[in-house]
Amino acid sequence: MLEVGAGTLDVPGLVARRRAPRAVTGLALALLAPTLLFLLVFTYWPLIGSIIGSFQRWGRGAMAPRFVGATNYRELWEDALFRQVLVNTGVYVIIESPLAVLFGLSAALAVEGHRRLRLVARALIFHPVLLPTVAIAAIWLFLLNPVSGPVADLASRVLGRAPNFLGEPALALGTVALVAVYKNCGLYMLFFLAGLQAIPRDLQDGARVEGASEWRVFRHVTWPLLGPVSLYVAITAILDALRNVDHIFVLTRGGPANATNVLLYETYLKAFEFWDTGRASAVTVMMVVALLGLAVVAMPRLERGIHYEA
Amino acid sequence: MKGRAVVSASVLLLLVGGLVSAGHAQLKLQFYYPVGVAGPLARIIDGYVKEWNQKNPQIQVEPVFAGAYTEAYAKTLAAIKGGTPPDVAIMLSQNLNDILSQDILISLDELIAADAAQVNLDDFFPAFMLNSRQGGKVWSLPFQRSTPVMYYNKEAFRGAGLDPTKPPQTQAELVADAHQLVKRDGDRVTRWGLQIPSGGGVDTWLLEALTIQAGGVLYDVNNSCCKVLLSSPAAEAAVQFLRDLGTKEKVSPPGPIDWGTTSNDFVAGRVAMIYHSTGSLGFIRNNAKFEFGTAFMPKAQRFGAPTGGGNFYLFKTTPADRRKAAWEFTKWMTSTEMLARWSIDSGYVAPRKSSWDTPLMKDYTGKYPQATAARDQLPYAMAELPVKNIIEVKRAIVTSLQQALTTTQPIGPILADGQKRVDEILK
Amino acid sequence: MFLLLATLTPSSEFSQGRYWSFPPSLENFALAWRSATFVVYYRNTILYTVGLLGVQLVTVTLAGYALARLPFRGRQGIFYFVFLQLFLPPVVLILPNFLTLRALGLADSLTGLALPYVASAYGIFLLRQGFRSIPKEYDEAALLDGAGRVRLLWHVLVPMVRPHLAAFSVVSLIYHWNEFLWPLVATSSNSVRVLAVGLQSFTRASESGAEWGLVSAGTLIVIAPLMLVFLLFQRLFIESFTQSGLKG
């Protein structure tokens, strides 16, 4: 049975289906209706709303909005703080996503063959995924206290001084990223474990029998077959990096001096603390544009990846 | 069968009866409150509200703990804008101009005039009323008010050869004492001399204090809603002082110091002197295992402190009958007796003079003289930064401050940049 | 680990840097429980996550089936329309969604909180994969036996995508149980607050005095159920991921 393109079936004997395409369409739309409705109201309409809003300036009080064209965008672009937020977001994603994926993959590989180890390791590495990010952040806030926290104590014994992980701009963004890695890598490990289990052992064993080293087995057998999973995990990791800011809330509130301020956090600040709806909408639109860019790049590849399996 | 029928019937009757009697014009009020200082204050407030609810079955108040000041404010605004406003809330006194620009408050003058005996405005310390008045009207009543004070570890003083009854009075003395108090273990510092927080919940407060002490004010008193004086000699001196503590004098940990963990560091014996809210007195008293004292913050040019803390506000959105009920609740919470109890339970300064004369209070200050430092500092107190768009302004100021504390660039230009930003925000 | 220790030690000891004490004290738990209305938070969080999941399972199954099995014009287009949402998580659209809720009068309600998530591209994607991996023979066999499409779906196909449903349920439950930013903004009354937001306010209050023992106790109270469920059902969890062939 072949599935080509949009999926027209090519099965002998089921002529009946082809004979009533309209009824099928009706049924399909009926089944899809709730989904489409909610998508329209809570995904696509808000998009349009944001675009419209971003061209307006709202008085902070109860004043009605006025149209100001592209002023919001221009001002944001000229604002050094916003440019810093953009850079921060980029750096954060570049640090957090690859690390989290790498740790997840390594953990999955390390743990894969060993039954007993697997249970323990799974629990240990996976449990942060179950915890609310705000809780994890609260714990790390305590651990990283530069004066009386255990990490500082350890660091000063080893290094002679205690770096202020959350208070030094150069360190803060990395620290915050690491906390996120800590939380997320367990989930990615699970995905990779699932992918690894789907790889037929004979392929790997076959290669080993032929004298290939572990690394070559990985590189030439395992890794290619993990292709679709890896792609999927990579995309999930990037999305997670962009949309999880809970820990920034607790750890640094965007500081010090906006060193850990990323796009979504700035959106929250502008929207819900400064009530600057116009500019907040503009930031939202920019985030959406970035995400759509990611979508354009990733979607075709995902579709292809899927068809490999089917 | 019969027994069961009887039981169910009586249960039903009880239920119905309960419903009916509860139906007697019982008003439920939503009360938002923040906690911005150390200690289990949320539990204490909930306790007070429970007491009120017991004494006033007709007016039931639901206390909603809303986080620290900034979040609570954001939440209150969100609730109002979202269509589910609270009936009464505690918000920072300094947010007055900002709140006024949202057009959600009712002025309290009429209500106060009608209840002049209970709510005698002269009974409130003038310093605390500074942030309540605007445009000739009174908009809020002081409740949990404070000033920063200096806490110092008397045991540490003795150990360092300093006289524990003579805390430093000038900044020069402060630094000198701090040097004596720093303890090192080789290269590691096991105890810092001084910590003045510069980041975290209360943001610009201590910067304001230092600015006042340096002879200036952080905002333009003649244009109090709309002009911040960040790029000024006094503010520069204040920022320079903070920076030097960490980098030049090395008596404080370098970089921005967190408000929240500073009180912890103090009770853990990791720092000998701190600037913190008098509202943290309760927490420090309960957790410090050493003798400690409080004192005025040392002067540079002069003694000085910003007032701080929260007031009670009432809203336009509240319908008339609930407003009356909310006012009753407000009056009770800001009564002489309650303010005295609250001050004792928390460490906040009771904003009414009469509270300090109650036997309860006299007894307390006899046992804990540390409580009086903030009150005695009041003559030197000024209003807290009152401009509108206050959250964004504070964030901009803190950004500049943190920049100054984490780099070695000259402070002048950093503050000038900050000034530009703030002016933009306040346009 | 650390969390456990912190919980069992009275706060004052903890502040001094002494991380454990004998005998372990439960006072932190008692205080934490009394300090915040955890019962309310629990109720809200359960209602929110389970309620949402229930609705999601329905929409996701129906949509996944339609996209997997029903040939109709414009299917690919609709698929992209739906799939795009994977890249537009509701939390990015937090501001406009808040405004929408307000306009609908649904701000500060658990229902409103759940609405943006009802349509879940992730779930639809998973279920579509699931349905597509079922060989068509099953469909044909049932149809030849005279079953209508609906019965086919319900009795034959749905049970076969159980692992996918399970995997999705796991992800959805965990995500929404711990969700913070959207509920922070979309709800304000205490009666509608969820656990993560309650915990954060709780942390913030004590942050000022950092009663870490208390905060830890509160945290443990919040995470306990999920941890328990995970420990008990670890194998099931993992296997649902594996069987659903999350490879693609």
Image: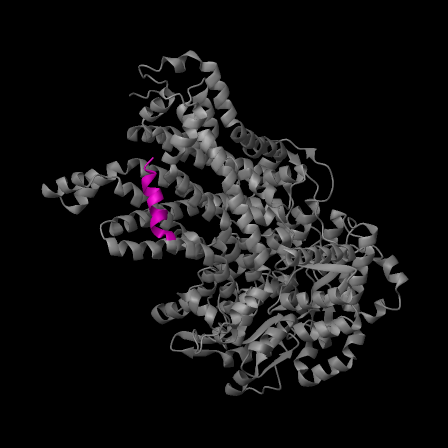
Drawn side of residue B264 relative to residue C244, left or right: right
Where is C75 relative to B371, above or below?
Answer: above
Q: Main secondary structure of the magenta part?
A: helix
Residue drawn at 36 percent across, 50 percent down:
A186
Residue A169 in view: no
Q: Is residue A53 shown left or right of residue B312?
A: left
List x then y, in percent, for residue A291: 47, 35
Rendered-image quadrant of the C terminus of chain A? top left
* Most foreground residue, B108 or B398: B108
Coloring basis for residues:
one colour
Image quadrant containing the N terminus of chain A: top left
Residue B271, relative to residue A252: is it above or below?
A: below
Of residue B397 and residue A309, the one placed in the foreground of this image is A309
Residue drawn at x 37%, y 70% as measured from the top left: A160
Give coordinates of residue B216: x percent, y percent.
69, 64
Figure check: B2 above or below A276: below
Q: Give the image location of residue A83, x and y in percent.
A: 51, 43
Residue A36 visible? The answer is yes
Q: Which residues are magenta?
A: C233-248
